[in-house]
Amino acid sequence: MNVGENFIAMSYATDFGTLFFPRYCSSCNRNLMHYEKAVCMHCLSDLPRLRMHDECNNAVEKLFWGRVDLHAATAYLSMPRNGISHRLIHRLKYHGDQEVGERLGALFAHELLDSDRMSKIDVIVPVPLHPKKLHVRGYNQCDCIARGMAEILGAEVSLNNLTRTHFNASQTRRGRISRWSNVKDIFWVREPEKLEGKRILLVDDVITTGATIEACAVALRKIKDVQLSVAALAVPA
């Protein structure tokens, strides 16, 4: 069997397999084609991309003015209530759909490759969950995003160095001041020497007031000679 015949045979086998084990788009529930991953092409084309990565003083960076020193900050998607990005992130956080996190992380990273400010990253640090919450959920959604990004950016993922020391209540219904009080001084770095001199990308799923990112960044900025950037999958519209 030559290469062309082998490819056709593999395509038929994949299509045949989807008859018995169908895969569905994490946003619209359409059947996925064999070449689609987690999200169908139709939904991907409608993603509300922000494309602010090379925009100095963009809306995400302004959140941290006077709060923490960052090299750059950006977000991939706008997240209107009940829109495509909202549905996808809800699936990632609350329905165990880790594949969609990796897929969106990879798409995000492809855009960052074209960024003069954010394409050169040594280490990706996902915002950590407390071990109790990690045990309940079974995974950290930010780890999924980081894995998808790391493969494209050629960066290492640091999963256990930045640590959340206290189990605190959800931030969802808190105001800005309450959010900051809820996360202040709850992060620390176990082995700072492993991150010395590195270009670090701190990754979160959604940035609202920026309180959690700020608390993480304060801990990471204590490390010698780091360049710290922030990337969020989405910001509320």
Image (cartoon, rainbow, N blue to C red):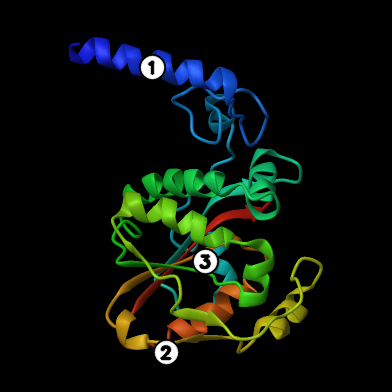
Q: Amino acid at mark 2?
A: Lys
Which disc, if any, is residue 149?
Answer: none
The answer to whether residue 66 of the structure is visible from this angle is no
Can you give x and y, in whole percent of width and height, for residue 34 in the image? Answer: 46, 23
Q: Nearer the viewer, residue 40 or 181?
A: 40
Q: Can you tell which quarter of the image residue 164 is in?
A: bottom right
Residue type (three-letter) at the residue carrying disc 1? Ser
Q: For the residue labelled by badge 2, is the local secondary structure a helix, a strand or a loop?
A: loop
The amino acid sitting under disc 3 is Glu
* Residue at image point 50% right, 21% down: 17
Question: Is label 2 in contact with label 1 (beta carbons under 8 Å)?
Answer: no
Compared with 135, 106 (above or below) is above
Which circle, 1 or 3, is nearer the viewer?
A: 1
Relative placement, left or right, of 53 versus 141 is left
Within 10 Å of disc 2 (Cα), the crowding (few <14, some 14-19, many 20+) is few
Residues at marks 1 and 3 touching, judged by CB atoms closer than 8 Å: no
The one of 235 and 149 positioned closer to us in this rendering = 149
Q: Residue at x 23, y 11 (%)?
A: 4
Badge 1: few (under 14), some or many (20 or more) residues near its Cα, within 10 Å? some
Residue underneath mark 3: 61
Sequence order check: which comes first, mark 3 or mark 2? 3
Residue pointed to by mark 2? 222
How far across and down, in percent of the image, does residue 45 sit? 54, 29
Q: Which residue is mark 1?
A: 11
Q: Earlier in the sequence, mark 2 or mark 1?
A: 1
